[in-house]
Image (spheres, helix red, strand yellow):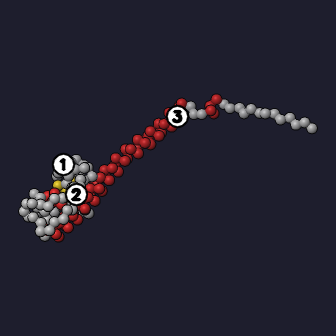
């Protein structure tokens, strides 16, 4: 008994060797749209992250000011400002006991210096620390204050 094996060649069409240029352009276009949307949306998250960072730094500064007040028996004057947390003040009122609160003054989420007011505008018995916000101008709607309602 003889068995005859025949080798059959698979038939391939010309389109089954890979992707066409049109298919590649469509896929790359879809990927571009998805990346563009992701980058556009991340801008909103960055703004929120900067606000959250600023609020955290405001709490840290407020805690350092309270520690200063406990040691010195008073808050720094407005002229001494937040620098009193970095260097011992030499102008009146000088602190009775002093301890460094920061090596350097922290910046807000937009890398700007904070503004120090004593007495505060909402609670005159406490100091107020203010971030000028995104626009960098004091007195606008985007300012963030340590005396804002939490």
Considering the image in quadrants, where does the C terminus appear? bottom left
Question: Up-down: is 82 above or below 136?
Answer: below
Label 2: element kind:
loop
Q: Which residue shows up at 47% across the image and 39% down it?
A: 30
Nearer the viewer's eye, disc 2 or disc 1?
A: 2
Question: Up-down: is 3 above or below 85?
Answer: above
Q: Number of labelled discs?
A: 3
Considering the image in quadrants, where does the N terminus appear? top right
Which residue is at the far top?
Answer: 14
In the rendered image, which residue does mark 2 sit on?
A: 103
Question: Up-down: is 71 above or below 44?
Answer: below
- How much space separates mark 1 and mark 3, taking CA atoms? 48 Å
In the rendered image, which residue does mark 3 sit on?
A: 24
Choose top left, top right, bottom left or bottom right for residue 126.
bottom left
Mark 2–mark 1 contact, CB under 8 Å? no
Q: Position of residue 149 (x, y in %)?
A: 23, 63
Q: Which residue shows up at 44% across the image and 40% down it?
A: 33
The answer to which of marks 2 and 1 sits earlier in the sequence is 2
Q: Which residue shows up at 54% across the image and 34% down it?
A: 23
Q: Residue 137 got which mark?
A: 1
């Amino acid at each position: 008994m003889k068995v005859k094996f025949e080798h059959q060649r698979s038939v391939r069409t010309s389109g089954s060797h890979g992707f066409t240029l049109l298919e590649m352009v469509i896929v790359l276009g879809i990927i571009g749209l998805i990346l563009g949307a992701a980058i556009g949306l991340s801008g909103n998250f960055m703004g929120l992250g900067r606000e959250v960072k600023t609020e955290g730094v405001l709490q840290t500064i407020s805690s350092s000011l309270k520690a200063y007040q406990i040691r010195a028996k008073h808050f720094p004057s407005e002229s001494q400002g937040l620098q009193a947390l970095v260097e011992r003040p030499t102008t009146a009122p000088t602190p009775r006991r002093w301890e460094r609160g920061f090596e350097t003054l922290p910046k807000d989420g937009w890398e700007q210096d904070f503004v120090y007011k004593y007495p505060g505008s909402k609670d005159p018995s406490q100091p107020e620390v203010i971030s000028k916000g995104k626009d960098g101008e004091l007195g606008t709607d985007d300012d963030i204050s340590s005396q804002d309602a939490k």
